Image: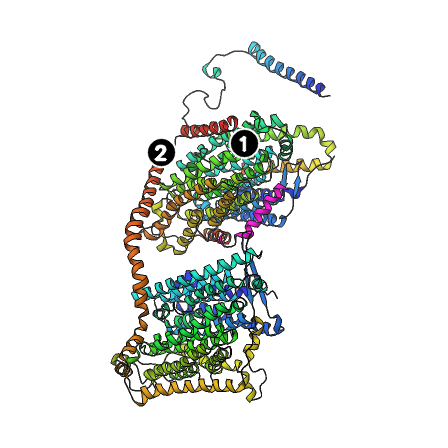
Amino acid sequence: MELNIVRYILIFPLLGFLVNGLVGKRLGNKAVGWIANSAVFISFALVVYIFIQLLSMAPGSRLITDTVYTWINSGSLTIDFKLMIDPLTIVMLLVVTGVGFLIHIYSIGYMHGDRSYSRFFAYLNLFMFSMLLLVLSSNIVLMFVGWEGVGLCSYLLIGFWYEKDSAANAGKKAFITNRVGDYGFLLGLFLLASAFASKGILTLDFTTMAAHISLISPQILTIVGILLFVGATGKSAQLPLYVWLPDAMEGPTPVSALIHAATMVTAGVYMIARMNFLYVLAPEALEVVAIVGGLTALYAATIGLVQNDIKRVLAYSTISQLGYMFVGVGVGAFSAGIFHLMTHAFFKALLFLGAGSVIHALSGEQDMRKMGGLKNKIPVTHAVFLAAALAISGIPGLSGFFSKDSILAAAYASGHTVIWLLGFITALLTAFYIFRLIYMTFYGESRLDKHAAEHVHESPKVMTVPLIILAVLSVIGGYIGVPQLLGNLVGWHNSDIFVNFLAPVFRTMPKHEMPVSTESWLMIGSIAMAILGVFFAWYVYIKSKMRPAEHAAESLPGVYRLLLNKYYVDEVYNAIIIKPLLWMSENFLWKIFDVRVVDGTVNGSAQVTQWASTKLRKIQTGDFQVYVMLFLIGVISVLAYFVLR
Amino acid sequence: MQNYNLINIAIYAVIIIGFAVITVLLSALVGPKAKSNEKLSPYECGVEPVGNARFSFPVKYYVIALMFLIFDVEVVFMYPWAIIVRALGAFGMYEMGVFIFIVLVGFVYAWKKGAFEWE
Amino acid sequence: MHFDLNYSAILPQIIIGVTLFISATIDAFSSARKWPVGIITLFGIGAGISSAVYLWGSNIVSFSQMVSLDEFSLLLFITVMIAGFITVLVSLKYVDDMEPDGGHFYLLLLSSLLGMMFLVSATNLIVIVLGLELMSLSIYPLVGFTRDRQISLEGAMKYLILGAIATAFLLYGIALIYSVLGTTNLYTIARILSTAQHMTGNLVMMAGVAFILIGFSFKVALVPFHAWTPDAYQGAPAPITGFMAAAVKAASFGAIIKVVIIVLQSFHVPVAEALWWLSAVTMFTGNIIAVMQKNVKRMLAYSSIAHAGYVVVGLVSGTAFGMSSAVFYLLSYTFTITGSFAIITYLEKNDGTGSELSDFSGLAKEHPILSLIMAVFMLSLAGIPPTAGFMAKLYVFSAAIKSGYIGLAIFGILTSVISLYYYLRIVYAMYFEESEGRTDTPVPAGIAAGVFIALWGVIQLGILPSDIMNFAMQSIQSLIH
C-alpha cells in the first residue's frame, strides 16, 4: 500500500533540526525544547497511526511504502528515495520514536542551563531524522545514508562538550572506529550491487533483492554478509571494533541513553535482520555473526564486573547485551534478536537515564566508589533503577527474561551449544555486575563527598516521569513475547505475539524442535543463573561489606588488573595501529609528502595562478579602444578558423 | 509577371532620384541668397555638427527626435495595411486598433513623464 | 484570407506585454514612490510563470513559422521569468532609494523579459534578432540606471557601443546565410542543409555561421568578446547585474542552443571545434582574472564569464544529454547568481560603494543567516555538493566525457578548482575577518524573500536534480522531434 504520510515521520525531526539549528539561539530555551519535543512527538503519533493501519491489514501483506522521488538515475542504476514500513520497521519505529520521545523530554530537565541548549536539541533532532531514515529506507543505499548520518550525529554529540579534551578525543575515536567498519559495509554494498548488476538487476531495493537473491552464488553472499557485518561491528560496538563505545560516555547522558544504548548501536542488528534473506543463504556468515556476538557478550560482561564509573559499567553492559542480540540473529532467530533489541531499549535507556539522574543528584559525580546509601535520598530513581536491573538480569516476569531466554533457547536448539554456554555464563555475570552497581550506588554506607552530600536531591518531574514510563515498559514489555511453553501453562494460545507479528518478514531457517523438558530445564537454568548473580553481588557487597576493589585485588590481582584495564585492548591498538600510523603520518606523509610534495604543488600552483591573474588582468585596461581591439582579434580568429579550416 | 514588377520599380526609382535632384538644383538656382555665418551652416538650429566632441548638449533634441521617429514609423506601417484593409476585414481593423493602442500607451507614458516639456 | 495566428503560441509573451502596459500606465499616473509598480510587475511575472507551467507539454508553431511554443522555450521562459521575479523582489526598496522617479526600472525589465522570450521562442533568424535587440536595448539603460554614477554610465556606454557592433556582426551573418540559402526560417534552413552536399566547403556559408557565432558569443560574454562584462557588471545596479548574469545569459544561450540543434547539425564538427576553443579560453581567462579582483561585483563578473565557458562545455558535446545539461546549468546558475546579487544589493550603499571584498568582513557576526546563505551560494558557484552548482557541473562534464571530450572536461575541472580560491575568499572574509563597523540596517523583506527563493532553488536542484534534469531532457527532445 502506498501511503504518503510516511515521509512526514522524517520531515518533522528535520524541520526541528533546521529551526533549532538556525534560529534556536534567538528563540530561547523554552521554545527550543518545545519545538524539538513536538517534532519527535508528531513523528511518534504518526508511527502509532501507521501501526494501527498496519494491524488492520492481513498479516501476510503488511507493507506500506512511500516513494518520495527517484534519487539516483544514472542509467545503469536506479535508486529511489523510497520509504518502506513492514512489521520489522514498525517495531524499530515505535522503539526509536517512543523511547526517543521520552529521552527528549528527559533532556529538557537534564540539559537545563547548558550553554548550548539549542545546539543539543538541534543535533538530537538531526539524529532522530537520520535514525528514522536508516530504519525507513527501502533500499540499502538510502539506508547507508542514514547509517552515516547517525554516525555523524553520534560524533557531534559525543564531542558535544568539545571544550573538554577527553570529549573531543572520544568523538574522534568513535568516528574513526566507525569509519573502519563503514569501509567494510561499503565494500559489501559495492560487491552486492555489482553482483546484482551482473544478473541484470539494476536496483538495490530490499524487496527486489529478496526476490532475486537466489540468482547470486553462495560464495559471494557469504563475503557480502561478512563485509556488511564488519560494518555492524563498528556501529554496534562488537569485537574487535567495540573500543569507541565506553569512551562515548563522555557525551551528555541522554545521548548515551538514546544513541549509545537504545537506538543507533542497534542499527547493526537491524541491518542483519533486514538483510535476513541474504544471511539465510549464507550460513557461514551467520555463523561468524553468532560467534562474534557470543564472544562479545561474555568479554564485555567480564570487563563490566570491575568498572567503577557508573556509566562505563552500563557501556560495557550495552556491548554485552548487543552481543546477545547478534547471537539471536546469528543463530537465525531474527525475531528473538529484535525482541531483545526492543526490551533492551527500554531497560537500558532507563538504566542510563537513571544513572543520569544519580549523576544529576550528585552534581556530576560518576565514580561509584564515592556513592552509596542513596536509596532513601532519591527514592524514585532507586525504584526505577531496581526495576531495570531486575529486567536486565533476567528475573522471571520482567521483560529481559523473556527476550534473553528466547535467544538462549534458540541458540541451544539450533545446536550452537558453545555459544549457548557463553550466553549462559554471561547471564550470571550480567546479574552480578548490575547488582554490584545497585548495591554500590544505593545501598551500604554513604561514601559521598561532603560537598556533594549537601546537595543531593531528587530530579525534577520532567526527568522522573519518563523514567517511570520506561520502568513500566521494562516490567511489562516482555509480555508480548511470552514463550509458548509458558503460555501453555496458563492456557494462552499463540502467546508469542511478537514472533508471529514479525514472522512474515523473515525467511525461515530450518526449524529446530526441542523436547519440552529440555526447554524447561534451560529456562530454569537461566533463572538460577540470574538469581545466583544477584546473590553473589549481595553477598560480596552487602553481607560481607567487603570493599569491592580491595577484595578482588587481593584474591586475584592479575585477573583483576587485566579486567580493570579492559584487557589492555586500547593499549594494544595504540601500539600496533595508532602509533605506527602516527609515526608514518608525521615522518613521511606530513614532513616529506605533505610539506614538500603537496604543499609545494599547492602553493606553487597558487603562486602561478596569482601571477597569471596579475598579468592577464592588465589586458582589461578599461580603454574602450582596447576592448574593440580584443573584439576584432576574436572576430578575425573565429572567421579565420571557419574559412581557412 | 516578375519582370513587369521590376520595370515598375525601376521607373519609380528614376522618378524619385530625378525629383530629389531637381528639387535641390531648383532651390539652389531660384532661391534668394543671404550669405551670413548662420545661414552657411548646414542646420540653422540644433547642435554644431563640427567641433570638439566633448561638450554638453541638450538631450531634449534627441527625445523629440526619437518621439518623432516612432510616430513616423507608425504611420509608414499603416500604408501597406491600408492597401489590404478591405481584404483583411474586421480582423484587420482590430489588429490596427491594438497596434495604435500600443503606441498610444507609449505616447501617454512619454507625455506624463514630461518628454514634451521644453523647460 | 487565411492567417496562421495562434495566440496561445505567445500567451506568456502577451501576459508580460499586458503587464508592461499596466505598469507603464500606473507608473505614469503615480507619485514618487514606485514600489506599487514593482508589485504589479511581480504579479505579472508570476502570472507569466504560471502560464508557462500550465502550457507545459504543448507544441505550437505559429505566426507563419516565426515563433514556436515548445517545452524548450517554456523552460527558458520559466528560467528568465524566475530571474526577473527575484530581481524585482530584490529591487522593490532599492529602486525607490536610488531614483526619485524610477518606475521605468520595472518597465525596462519587463520589456527586456519580453525580448528574451521572443528570442528563445523564435524559429526565424529575423525574430531572433528582434528579440535580441529588444532585450539588449532595454538592458543598456538599466545598466546606466543610476544616472549620477559615472561608473554606471561608463559601463552602459561601453556595453551599448560594443553591443551595436556585435549586432552588426550577427545581422551580417544572417544576411550571408540568407544569400546562400534564400530563407531565414530555421526549419527550412535545416531542411536545405540536411540535403545539400559540401556545405562546409562553402566559404560564404561558413563566414555566415562564424558571424552568427560571434554575435552570440558577445551576448554571453565568451572570451575574447567579453571585454564589456566587467565594466557593465560593476557599473550596473546590483540587482540588474544579477539579472544580466542570469537572464540575459540564459536567453542568449537558449537561442544558441536552438540554432545549434536545429540548424547546425550538419555543421556540428566545425562549430563544436570552435566552441571547444572558446570554452577553454573562456573558462581559463574568466577564472584566472577573477582571482585578483577586490570588488565582489567585478569578481562575479569574471566568474560569470567563466560560467559561460562551462555552459559551452555542455554545447560542445553536441548530444541531447549535453544540451540538457547546459539548460540545467542555466537554471542552476540563475538561482545562484540572482541570490548572490540579492545579498550584494543589501550591502550596496546609495553611492554605489559597499561591494568591495572588505565590505564582507565579519558579516557572519552581524548577519549569521545571510552569511550562511551567501556561503551556500558561493559553494554552489564553486560547484561543491550538495548544491545546484555541483550537479550542473557534474552534468556538463559527464556529458563532455561521454562524447569523448575528456581533455576539455579535465581542463574545466582544473579551472573550477582555481575558482574555489576566490569564492572562498568571500566566505573567509565573512567568517574570519573582523568587521570594520557598518551601519546595521535590517534586511528588507523583498530581499529576504528573493534570497530564500534563490536558496530554495539552489538546494532543490542540488538535492533533487533528477526531476529538473528530466524537464531539461524533455525540453531538448521537443526541439529535436
Q: Residue at x 73, y 37 (%)?
A: B90
A645 falls in the magenta region: no
Q: Position of residue C80 (x, y in %)?
A: 53, 44
Residue type of the residue flagged with mark 1: Ile
Task: Return the residue at label 2.
Answer: A618
Q: Nearer the viewer, residue C244 or C447?
A: C244
- The subunit carrying tag 2 is A
Check chain identity for marks 1 and 2: say if they share one.
no
C474 falls in the magenta region: yes
The answer to whether residue A163 shows anywhere in this view is no
Q: Is residue C118 left or right of residue B52?
A: right
Looking at the image, residue C188 lies above or below residue A170:
above
Q: Position of residue A323 (x, y in %)?
A: 43, 74
Q: Which corner quadrant holds the N terminus of chain A?
A: bottom right
Q: Is residue A620 left or right of residue A50?
A: left
Task: Return the residue at label 1.
Answer: C212
Q: Which residues are magenta?
A: C462-481
Q: Position of residue A383 (x, y in %)?
A: 40, 84
Dominant secondary structure (helix, strand or loop) of the stretch shown in magenta: helix
* Residue furthest out toward the top: B29
- Give the crowd class for mark 2: few <14, some 14-19, many >=20 residues within 10 Å: few
